[in-house]
């Protein structure tokens, strides 16, 4: 990666972080959980993008290190070949020196042999002149006929044969020495030419290996510089990721604080509802007592008005929708894969209203790719905080921060998000909702569907 690209990446990252809301201004006195969650999702998305780039840098660094190791291996192999070539060159140089010394020695021998040949040539010339001047072989006959006795004749015959044999030997040696001289010259010159050729090839190979080694060394140097640059880029990205994690953590604290605030509102509302209920009960009891007194006195009055029954279950909880339970809380199989189902699925056809399962406050109402149209409500039941989730709705009719009563309509059953047919996915959490769903409980513990 070149320097210009790295600078552009750093500037883009800085601008991106600058475009995110600073934590000091993320929320006013009562920013909604939905707004805070959106900011958190934006930061999480950016963090995921940065972490992806960090992984890319790690991959590039690993690839770079592998290339460096590969180059080092190649350099080592080239160095081994160079050492072997240099050894062979030294051997050939030694052989050339030895052959040159052999040639020099041979030249000395040749000089001696040439002197011998020259002397023999002179001797043969003298012998030829003598034969020419004295008539050749007739002189030998005179020598033989001039013998004084048979013994002298034998001696003269032997002497003549010796002279003739000597002349023949000189001539044979002359031919042999000349042939040997020519042969030695050819062999030594051929050997020297072969050694010189081999040495030239080895020197050419050494030059090529030196060039390869230099190129590999330069490439290794470039890879080291590139790795240093990648390490800096990864460090900067990691710093940015850490900053985003810090912002994400602080936003999580604000989300929990807002959820706690809404839960406290729900708790105060429950206390107020109980107080009003007690007051209404006391009022009804007083009215009933007064009616009884009036009746004993002979007067008559109209009976107290009976409040219409609500279309919800008695108690703190009610079923959020009518329909058939298609999936219960717990382990099941979806698309051939085993998974844990953190809620209860209720399915029905037509326009099916969905109700709040208990009194509370809406902490979030939005659309997500998995839950589709979804509503989160916080409740306070007998001092304990609960959170209910209503997913895959066709539409929602409540907004974040809105107070709802048990049985209030909050939307209609649908098939939005990751869904395979119209139904309500209902979750109940004993405490706050979290992504790991560690507080999820079986809704049947509290609700009679």
Image (spheres, rainbow, N blue to C red):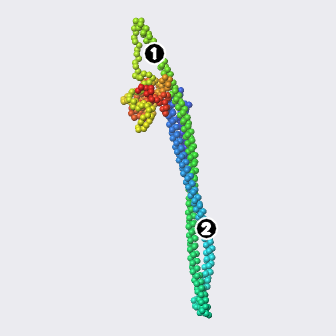
User: Is residue 147 positioned above or below 195 on the image?
Assistant: below
Does 281 lie within the magenta span? yes
The residue pinned by badge 1 equals 281
Q: Residue at x 58, y 62 (%)?
A: 88
Front residue of this view, candidates 292 and 359: 292
Rendered location of residue 421, percent (x, y): 39, 33
Q: Is residue 243 visible?
A: yes
Does 427 lie within the magenta span? no
Task: Work out which quarter of the rendered image holds the C terminus and state it.
Answer: top left
Task: Say what secondary structure mark 1 lies in.
Answer: helix
User: Is residue 227 positioned above or below 186 on the image?
Assistant: above
Rendered location of residue 271, percent (x, y): 49, 20
Is residue 310 shown left or right of residue 175?
A: left
User: Is residue 55 positioned above or below 377 on the image?
Assistant: below
Distance Cα–Cα, label 2 vs label 1:
128 Å
The numbered dot on residue 199 is none
> Which quadrant would residue 195 be assigned to in this image?
bottom right
The residue pinned by badge 2 equals 98
Residue density around tag 1, few if under 14, some if 14–19, many if 20 or more, within 10 Å: few
């Amino acid at each position: 990666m070149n320097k210009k690209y790295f600078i552009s990446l750093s500037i883009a990252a800085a601008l991106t972080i600058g475009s995110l809301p600073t934590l000091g201004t993320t929320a006013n006195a009562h920013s909604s959980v939905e707004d805070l969650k959106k900011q958190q999702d934006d930061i999480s998305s950016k963090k995921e993008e940065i972490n992806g780039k960090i992984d890319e840098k790690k991959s590039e660094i690993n690839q770079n290190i592998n290339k460096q190791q590969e180059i080092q291996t190649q350099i080592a192999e080239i160095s081994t070949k160079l050492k072997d070539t240099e050894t062979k060159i030294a051997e050939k140089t030694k052989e050339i020196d030895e052959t040159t010394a052999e040639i020099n020695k041979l030249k000395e021998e040749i000089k001696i042999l040439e002197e011998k040949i020259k002397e023999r040539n002179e001797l043969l010339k003298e012998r030829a002149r003598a034969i020419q001047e004295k008539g050749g072989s007739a002189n030998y006959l005179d020598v033989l006929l001039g013998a004084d006795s048979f013994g002298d004749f034998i001696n003269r015959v032997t002497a003549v044969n010796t002279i003739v044999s000597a002349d023949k030997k000189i001539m044979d040696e002359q031919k042999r020495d000349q042939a040997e001289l020519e042969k030695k010259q050819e062999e030594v010159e051929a050997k020297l030419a072969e050694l010189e050729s081999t040495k030239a090839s080895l020197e050419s190979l050494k030059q090529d290996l030196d060039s390869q080694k230099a190129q590999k060394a330069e490439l290794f140097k470039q890879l080291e510089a590139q790795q240093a640059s990648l390490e800096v880029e990864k460090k900067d990205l990691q710093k940015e990721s850490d900053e985003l994690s810090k912002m994400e953590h602080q936003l999580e604290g604000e989300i929990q604080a807002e959820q706690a605030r809404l839960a406290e509102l729900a708790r105060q509302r429950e206390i107020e509802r109980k107080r009003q209920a007690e007051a209404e009960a006391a009022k009804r009891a007083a009215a009933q007592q007064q009616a009884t007194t009036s009746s004993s006195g002979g007067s008559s009055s109209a009976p107290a008005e009976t409040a219409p029954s609500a279309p919800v279950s008695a108690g703190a909880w009610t079923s959020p929708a009518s329909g058939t339970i298609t999936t219960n809380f717990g382990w099941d199989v979806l698309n051939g894969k085993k998974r844990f189902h953190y809620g209860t699925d209720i399915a029905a056809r037509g326009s099916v209203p969905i109700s709040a399962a208990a009194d509370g406050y809406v902490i979030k109402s939005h659309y997500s790719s998995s839950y589709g149209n979804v509503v989160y409500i916080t409740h306070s039941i007998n001092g304990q905080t609960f959170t209910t989730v209503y997913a895959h709705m066709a539409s929602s009719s409540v907004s974040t921060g809105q107070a709802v009563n048990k049985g209030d309509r909050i939307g209609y059953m649908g098939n939005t998000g990751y869904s395979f047919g119209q139904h309500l996915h209902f979750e109940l959490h004993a405490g706050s909702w979290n992504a790991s769903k560690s507080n999820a409980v079986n809704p049947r513990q509290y609700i009679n569907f």
